[in-house]
Image (cartoon, rainbow, N blue to C red):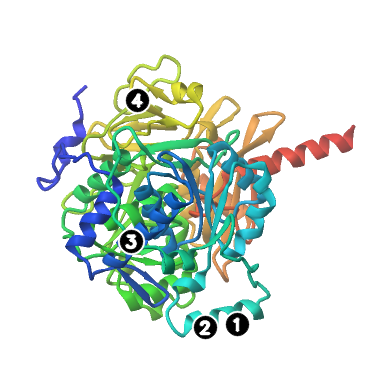
Amino acid sequence: MEERPWLKWYPKEIPHHLQYEEVSLQETLRRTAKKFPDRPAVHFMGKEIPYRKLFESSLKLANYLRKIGLQKGDRVAVMLPNTPQTFISFYGILFAGGIVVQVNPLFTEREIAFQLKDAGAKFIIVLDMLFNRVKNVEKETDLRHIIVTGIKDYLPFPKNLLYPMVQKRQKTVPPKVEHEGRHHLFAEIMKRTEAKDIPDEVNPKEDVAILQYTGGTTGFPKGVMLTHFNLYANAKMCDAWMYKFKEGEGATLGVLPLFHVYGLTTVLVFPVMKGDMAILLPRFDAGEVLKTIDKLKPKVFPGAPTMYIGLLNHPDLGKYDLSSIEICLSGSAPLPVEVQQQFEKLSGGKLVEGYGLTESSPVTHANFLWDNERVKGSIGVPWPDTDAKIVSLSTGETLPPGEIGELAVKGPQVMKGYWNRPEETEQALKDGWLMTGDLGYMDENGYFYIVDRKKDMIIAGGYNIYPREVEEVLYEHPAVKEAVVAGVPDPYRGETVKAYIVLKEGQRVTEEELDRFARKQLAAYKVPRIYEFRDELPKTAVGKILRRQLVEEEKRKLAEKEEKKA
């Protein structure tokens, strides 16, 4: 088999190997602030923060953290939505020598307590609305200091004055926190602290920059140790892939949550390295996204399939101009071909599917943006300096093109390991290769395809069925807005195929009609036996549909049925 067959498709502008400096992530901000001091780093609700200000604010936070006792390697939790404070906190913690631990703001108290305790976080920076949740679990953790901030702290005038009134009307007034003792106010830190530069004491290849917790779809979430170099290398690869974009000229739409590694790399780390502006939205709202694109003209829109689907199905879609969008990199879940084609036609930009996972900072593969045709249904080819292969589930040997096995990847973006979990690190990393847990194959040209998660494969009556293949067919039906397929327990077949469907507004379709539609394109054993229509599907903050949650629901229903029989 030809070694790295994908390289022959690389455009001449993309090098096979990149030059990487061994620099810390905070050094990239220092350099950008020097090069583009007055260029906006962040746009938030009408307010812009230039790079000079972002740099100074990060140093203020770093000096304050050191003043209240942060030592090199201490973990600092950040529990914030997409706000300027997230940028300041990320770089401030790194300047201080700490490790960032990102906590999902949607977490329950039990989930917060687990993550803070597992990471051994001594400090947390939290949104005022979430303060009580942290306070209620504080005794179960190693927390010593809580820094509190609010949305209004970085709103422009007069929104900063009106926002508290809106909160009062909506009965969402945050608790009052005083700047004293173990509690600290972000706004006061910015007023009272000097922005003294702090020399780097970082070994980029060894020192962990963030503990990024996995979703925990199997067992408890694990803290993925990503070094400064892991994240920097992935941003450099991204830069090589987007070779037509120059420094200091772009704007990225930041609707992906920054507490997810995909959002962190594409909306925070990469734009800061390039001197681009991040246009932040605290959450995904299709109407707000359309208005923002129309008004602020971002060029880059990293997202997830459910986001593009939400925009395509918005009733006011035709009122907005989306022509500024040049690049959309879709990740976190398979991108239906129908969605890709419709969105490209609408915006005139390129929407390409990529692939990655938390353990690889996150991107390992993508389709080419320009010059080469994309391959339908493929995640593309490995990025520069990234190796990939398909290995047999039984023997671990490399499989030839066309055969399905587990995808393994290797490269400078691959994690150091799992926090305090040596056994699980050993299972995931084999001779430097990261075992992804995804089933796929490589074609003769070196393009890769994911057929499904190893754990999501359905075995019905002895046949292997890959949900993604069935979902692609269902998405082609004109009435279907969202579809997810899962294996549910079946006493005769072991598992059977069930489809969960969300219909487009105003559309109707019966189970029988969907069944006839699917049978025209799928072998009989792959056709869903059960359909369930829903108003919405459970999703992660990034918009990834939670297939496992649906499977667990089915198991609970079956157990309850069995109990009643007994």
- Give the x, y percent position of residue 144: 57, 47
Q: Would you say the residues marked 2 and 4 are in contact, meaning their CB atoms lie under 8 Å apart?
A: no
* Above or below: residue 459 compared with residue 148: above
As drawn, is 492 to the left or to the right of 345? right
Q: Circle 3: is it few (<14), some (14-19), or many (20+) Cα within 10 Å? A: some
As drawn, is 166 to the left or to the right of 229? right
As drawn, is 17 to the left or to the right of 308? left
Q: Please give the label number shown on residue 165.
A: 1
The answer to whether residue 486 is visible is no
**Label whose residue precedes the other's in the sequence (2 or 3):** 2
Q: Please give the label number shown on residue 227.
A: none
Q: Amino acid at mark 1?
A: Met
Q: Amino acid at mark 2?
A: Leu
Alpha-carbon span between mark 2 and mark 3: 27 Å
- Which quadrant holds residue 338? bottom left
Q: Would you say the residues marked 1 and 2 are in contact, meaning their CB atoms lie under 8 Å apart?
A: yes
**Label whose residue precedes the other's in the sequence (2 or 4):** 2
Q: Which residue is mark 3?
A: 195
- Give the x, y percent position of residue 379: 33, 43
- Give the x, y percent position of residue 447: 27, 37
